[in-house]
Image: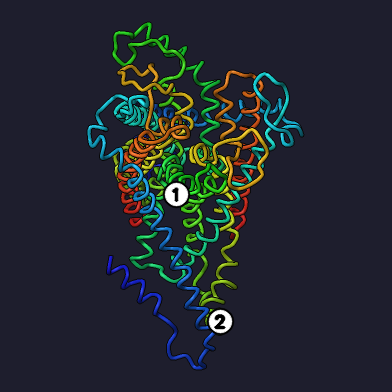
């Protein structure tokens, strides 16, 4: 820290400097060293996880991976085409439920009920909902879908994922709608637009990039979710041909194959991790790029 | 509750009055209908939490009636004799989360300080903030896979050394045999660190710069300023972030299930395998039936209650922090 020389004649400039060996300065330097260390420790696992996933996953990266069925133990080759389709299906169902519901709910919070106790309560419950453990959400989906329909299914997995995606979408959508300047609303109403027109033609389009960011992040998170799927979508070694049957997903495949002793299946688990991590990375970078572009 | 209902009614009834040209009836219906539609979904979002609580409580009722509160303290989990108790799982959940907090809190706050004070030019700071965020985005199951093949071999070597040299300490009293409580808590620490760091950073950035300038002006060193002025004023936010991290640790499932060893035991040693409520659910739910399902639902209800308390506390703390901005 640069200390300007003292203009006062009775102090020499040096009296404002700290001795580098005084205990106070030494303590400060040591603590600064410690936070640099903390940052290094925090980044180490990220680098390690990314490196191992890339090294171990890249071996198996080929077209077969996306077009073939998982092999039985001790058989070479194979892929996880069915799990990719299953993940697309369950995440698709989750998105189809949670995106419209979340955006409509957010429109109410931001456009019709802003700064009311009701909005504050819904916002509070929504935040608490986002903290509910994903496995408990799985139990919930099990009890309302699996128990009523009598079968593990993509639908049950999709419902569980929808509950997990909902709070993220509501929060990001409400935040982005609220950040649309009020002048645009006043201008629209001044031109004679109805409330419905103002929201759907003016406010919503202005907020779309930011809402998309939230949607993308929630989709990426849902694709990686495992806990709510292991007893709702379950797993299957075969191709998906219907919504109402056990459905394989990439994340459950990683879990199942990580704990087998078979080398080939372990390799598939690493390759699956690479696909999931790549998806998350792309979504995060895209999201940052979109939000970064906004003025 | 009736106040809320009244508020909904007034909100929905509030319509444009005294317009110059009456709008067509259809356009007014569209407006009101749209408002009702969005209101319905907003309230549905709020009620989802309630629905989860009621549904899980309802399903666990047979087990609650059968075992009552002794479920919380009993250590048997025997599907053959249909006797269930959740104490080892509750113990494992609490201990693994506590150990994770112990590791993640100092490092998380350190990272938050590193990324909020002017240690670095902001051109370097911003990408680092993004990298820490990424740490939170990696799927739990990927951490688990990495834990099995990388972390367990690494940590069991360290654990063996601790056991051989400090084996008289109860925490290190059993030799590490691969998976166990210690690996689970390290993985959990890695996973909650970005949450603690992000929320603490928000709280630190929100501290008014006048406070900092005043402390520097009085001759405080950088770290006297941080420890005596900045950290105390960001305290509630940091505690809120810690609670959010704790909530995540309590309910984290996949990574923990894959490295904790899943043994229904209670041991003081951090090297012995253990179990948590979440991993118990992950392991047994798909194949369970009858009273076992109901008992698992009961444990899920306990987990739900635990995380609910922690998350509500966190939410209240973070809200007060945000309001002070």
Quarter of the image with the C terminus of chain B in it: bottom left
* Residue A193 badge: 2
In this rendering, the label closer to the viewer, 1 or 2: 1
Pick the front one: B303 or B62: B62
Task: Tell me if residue A127 comes above or below residue B119 in the rendering.
Answer: below
Element under disc 2: loop
* Within-10-Å neighbours for mark 1: few <14, some 14–19, many 20+: some
- The residue depicted at 26 percent of the width and 32 percent of the height is B72
Is B29 placed left or right of B63 in the picture?
right
Image x and y of residue A131, in percent: 40, 45
Task: Tell me if residue A186 comes above or below residue B319 in the rendering.
Answer: below
Task: Tell me if residue A278 comes above or below residue B315 in the rendering.
Answer: above
What chain does mark 2 sit on?
A
Image x and y of residue B106, in percent: 37, 31
Q: Residue furthest toward the right? A: A63
Q: Are marks 1 and 2 in contact (CB under 8 Å)?
A: no
* Within-10-Å neighbours for mark 2: few <14, some 14–19, many 20+: some
Sequence-earlier tag: 1 or 2: 1
Residue A264 can be seen, yes or no = yes
Image x and y of residue A259, in percent: 54, 23
- The residue depicted at 33 percent of the width and 47 percent of the height is B58
* Residue A144 badge: 1
Residue B125 can be seen, yes or no = no
Quadrant assignment, res B166: top left
Pick the front one: A265 or A26: A265
Quadrant assignment, res B322: bottom left
Is A50 placed left or right of A119 in the picture?
right
Element under disc 1: helix
- The residue depicted at 55 percent of the width and 27 percent of the height is B145
């Amino acid at each position: 820290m640069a200390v300007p020389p003292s203009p006062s004649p009775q102090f020499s400039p040096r009296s404002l400097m700290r001795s580098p060996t005084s205990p106070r300065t030494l303590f400060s330097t040591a603590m600064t060293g410690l936070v640099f260390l903390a940052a290094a420790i925090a980044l180490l696992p990220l680098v390690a996880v990314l490196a191992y996933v890339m090294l171990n996953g890249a071996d198996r990266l080929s077209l077969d991976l996306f077009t073939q069925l998982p092999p039985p133990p001790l058989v070479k080759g194979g892929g996880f085409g069915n799990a990719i389709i299953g993940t697309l299906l369950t995440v698709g169902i989750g998105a189809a439920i949670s995106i419209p519901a979340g955006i409509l709910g957010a429109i109410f919070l931001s456009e019709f009920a802003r700064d009311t106790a009701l909005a504050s309560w819904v916002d509070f419950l929504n935040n608490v909902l986002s903290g509910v453990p994903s496995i408990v959400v799985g139990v919930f989906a099990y009890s309302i879908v699996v128990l009523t329909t009598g079968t593990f299914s993509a639908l049950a997995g999709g419902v569980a994922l929808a509950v997990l995606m909902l709070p993220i979408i509501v929060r990001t959508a409400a935040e982005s709608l609220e950040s649309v300047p009020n002048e645009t609303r006043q201008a629209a109403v001044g031109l004679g637009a109805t409330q419905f027109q103002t929201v759907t033609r003016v406010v919503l389009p202005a907020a779309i990039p930011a809402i998309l960011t939230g949607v993308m992040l929630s989709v990426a998170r849902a694709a990686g979710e495992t806990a709510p799927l292991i007893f709702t979508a379950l797993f299957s070694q075969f191709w998906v041909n219907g919504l109402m049957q056990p459905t394989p997903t990439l994340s459950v495949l990683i879990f199942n194959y990580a704990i087998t002793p078979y080398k080939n299946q372990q390799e598939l688990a690493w390759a699956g991790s690479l696909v999931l991590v790549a998806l998350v990375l792309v979504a995060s970078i895209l999201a940052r790029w979109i939000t970064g572009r906004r003025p | 509750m009736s106040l809320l209902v009244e508020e909904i009614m007034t909100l929905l009834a509030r319509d444009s009055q005294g317009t110059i040209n009456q709008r067509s009836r259809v356009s007014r219906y569209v407006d009101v209908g749209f408002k009702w539609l969005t209101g319905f979904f907003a309230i549905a979002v709020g009620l989802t939490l309630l629905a989860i609580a009621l549904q899980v409580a309802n399903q666990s009722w047979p087990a609650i009636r059968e075992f009552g509160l002794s479920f919380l303290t009993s250590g048997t989990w025997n599907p053959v004799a249909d006797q269930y108790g959740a104490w080892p799982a509750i113990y494992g959940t609490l201990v693994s989360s506590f150990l994770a907090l112990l590791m993640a809190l100092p490092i998380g706050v350190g990272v938050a300080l590193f990324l909020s004070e002017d240690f670095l030019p902001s051109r370097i700071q911003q990408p680092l903030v993004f990298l820490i965020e990424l740490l939170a985005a990696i799927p739990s199951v990927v951490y688990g896979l990495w834990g099995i093949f990388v972390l367990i071999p690494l940590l069991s070597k360290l654990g063996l050394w601790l056991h051989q040299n400090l084996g008289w300490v109860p925490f290190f009293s059993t030799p590490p045999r691969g998976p166990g409580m210690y690996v689970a808590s390290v993985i959990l620490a890695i996973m909650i660190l970005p949450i603690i760091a992000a929320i603490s950073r928000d709280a630190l950035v929100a501290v008014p710069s006048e406070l900092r300038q005043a402390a520097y002006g009085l001759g405080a060193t950088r770290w006297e300023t941080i420890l005596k002025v900045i950290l105390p004023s960001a305290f509630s936010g940091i505690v809120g972030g810690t609670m959010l991290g704790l909530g995540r640790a309590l309910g984290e499932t996949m990574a923990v299930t894959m490295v904790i060893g899943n043994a229904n035991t209670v041991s003081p040693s951090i090297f012995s395998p253990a179990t948590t409520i979440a991993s118990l659910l992950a392991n047994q739910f798909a194949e369970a039936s009858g009273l076992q399902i109901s008992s698992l639902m009961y444990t899920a209800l306990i987990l739900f209650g635990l995380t609910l308390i922690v998350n509500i506390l966190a939410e209240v703390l973070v809200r007060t922090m945000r309001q002070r901005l």
